[in-house]
Amino acid sequence: MENADLQAVLEAVMARLFIPLEASGRHVHITKEQAVTLFGHSLTPKRPLSQPGQYLANERVTLVGPKGQFENVAVLGPERPEGQVEISLTDGRSLGIVPALRLSGDVKGSPGAVLRGSRGQVKLSQGVICAKRHIHLTPETAKRLHLKDKQDVKLQVFTERPLIFDDVTVRVSDKFADFVHLDYDEANACGFRNGDLSRILREGTD
């Protein structure tokens, strides 16, 4: 077997056994109307992200809380139906905000914050969350692993400081690519580096 063929087989086996890890830093999602208020125009893509159709925008905001603020915060596109801020628990301490621990999109009753852009500002009455650690899976991968959408599992991470995360939520969609998303508190706790992998240990609750 040629080296190229052997490498292809190895990569195929690795893809079936392991799921890549990604660390997600603080960022915001905004509506088209909010983008116009903040920047005077819709979001403009800078580079694509790992999830199909998602991108890092050229635009940035200042995120303001009762006790502090973060400048140059990433904005992710495309625009969404509702504004959302994703921060870590440590970020929340600096801002004076206790973010709700939620899956993305579940913002009802969560704290608010102020976003400042190059042309204006937007006050969110809700939308500040700490994203619950989760795994994006395609339907094909979920079927092969016998997993369902919104199911919680244990996850072993092969990092500089290996550990096992409990209560990791599986999210299944044909719009996803297979990746685990941790916030920076979790990534720092396990010594994450780009290229690190993970493995689902067992099925959890439905």
Image (spheres, grey):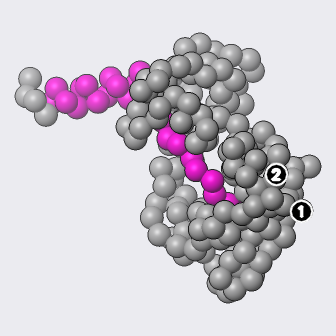
Residue plotted at (47% across, 69% down) = 46
For the residues labelled 1 and 2, the Cα–Cα distance comes to 13 Å
Could you say where residue 126 lies in the image, as x and y percent from the top left? 86, 57
Residue plotted at (78% across, 39% down) = 101
Q: Nearer the viewer, residue 59 or 193?
A: 193
Give the amino acid at mark 2: Ile
Q: Is residue 11 above or below residue 95?
A: above
Quarter holding residue 201? top right
Report the span colored magenta: 5-29
Say whether residue 173 is left or right of residue 47. Answer: right
The residue identified by callout 2 is 97
- Quadrant location of the N terminus in the rendered image: top left
Give the amino acid at mark 1: Ser
Residue 179 shows in this picture: no
Q: Indicate whether residue 28 is drawn in magenta.
A: yes
Tell me the tag on residue 170. Answer: none
Q: Residue furthest left?
A: 2
The residue identified by callout 1 is 125
Q: Nearer the viewer, mark 1 or mark 2?
A: 2
Quick one: label 1 or label 2, which is nearer the N terminus?
A: 2
